Amino acid sequence: MTGAVPGSVGGWLDDSRLLVRSLKILPVSSIQVVSANSFYEPSVNKIYDATTGAVLFSTSDTPLGKGAVSGANVVFGAGSLVRIETR
């Protein structure tokens, strides 16, 4: 697939859709698929729209780079706390 689309691989959204990093979506280290068109990036604690790159969820807390989406919540470490916020 090299050269098929401009950018670099960010991860698979499903069996047939590949996330390609571009100028709209910052480089990602790992992703968790949230829906058919969105993903969570734990290192920045944000949920992105995979088509537009728009941020759908973020927080003002400084994330520790580890987190996950569980149902309607985002669970992440911030400082000495484990936070749970509604996405």
Image: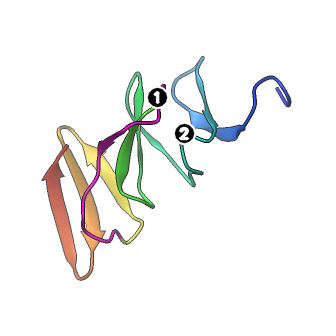
Identify the residue at the far right of this view: 3
Position in image of residue 69 (x %, y %): 29, 46
Magenta span main SS: loop
Which amino acid, by three-letter code, is at mark 2? Lys
Relative side of 2 to 29, left or right: right
Residue to which mark 1 is pinned: 52
In this rendering, the count of numbered labels is 2
Q: Position of residue 59 (x, y in %)?
A: 25, 58
The x, y position of residue 4, in whole percent, is: 81, 23
Most foreground residue, 68 or 56 = 56
- In this picture, which residue range is highlighted in magenta? 51-63
Q: Nearer the viewer, residue 33 or 38?
A: 38
Q: In this figure, which colouring scheme has been used for the structure?
A: rainbow
Vertical side of 61 occupied by 30: above or below: above
Q: Which mark is residue 24?
A: 2
- Residue at 48% across / 25% down in the picture? 51
Q: Earlier in the sequence, mark 1 or mark 2?
A: 2
Please check the rendered image and state whether residue 58 is part of the magenta-colored stretch, yes or no. yes
Quarter location, residue 54? top left
Return the residue nearer the eye: 42 or 3. 3
Horizontal and vertical percent position of residue 79: 26, 80
Location of the C terminus (image quadrant)? top left
Give the structural element (helix, strand or loop) at label 2: loop
Q: Residue furthest top?
A: 16
The residue most toward the bottom is 80
Image-quadrant location for residue 60: bottom left
Q: Do tag 1 and tag 2 residues touch (Cβ < 8 Å)?
A: yes
Q: The residue under label 1 is which amino acid type? A: Thr
Horizontal side, residue 40 vs residue 70: left or right: right
Query: In which quadrant will I find the N terminus?
Result: top right
Q: 10 Å neighbourhood of mark 2: few (<14), some, or many (≥20)?
A: few
